[in-house]
Amino acid sequence: MILEIVSPEALLFSGEVTSISLPGVDGSFQILNNHAPIVSILKQGTVKITAPSFNLDKEVADKFNKVNDQNYTLDINSGTIEMKDNKVIVLAD
């Protein structure tokens, strides 16, 4: 599936991922390929991203924490997520 993470300052990430875990207001949840359409509000917490490879721009790479070659995390204060047609868009603060 395609993931885009957008902040007010910049596009933080855009690429193919295998899973994403998010801090929802009612608890953390995970999205995998072919997930049903969803719109949700996010609270402060950590977004966990799993992908075959990561291509991060130098300008935003410092916002991400590398767990290993296929896993990165991103701390957010709040946000919104939409999953539709195998594309996830995260609007993060």
Image (spheres, grey):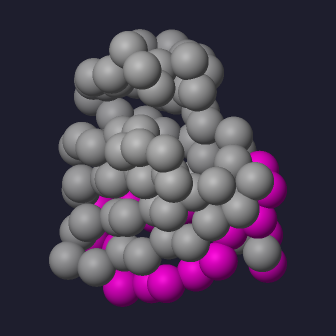
Please give left or right for residue 23 compared with residue 84 in the image: right
**Residue 5 colored in magenta in the image:** no
Question: Residue 20: x, y in percent?
Answer: 48, 51
Report whether residue 28 is seen: no
**Residue pictured at 37% horizontal, 75% vertical:** 83
Q: Nearer the viewer, residue 45 or 8?
A: 8
Q: Which residues are magenta?
A: 26-45
Does residue 55 lie above or below 42 as drawn?
above
Question: Residue 25: x, y in percent?
Answer: 78, 75
Does residue 13 lie above or below 29 as drawn?
above
**Residue pictured at 42% horizontal, 20% vertical:** 59
Does residue 54 lie above or below 69 as drawn?
below
**Residue pictured at 36% horizontal, 45% vertical:** 11
Q: Quadrant of the N terminus?
A: bottom left
For residue 92, what is the image quadrant?
bottom right
**Residue 34 colored in magenta in the image:** yes
**Most common secondary structure along the magenta stretch:** strand
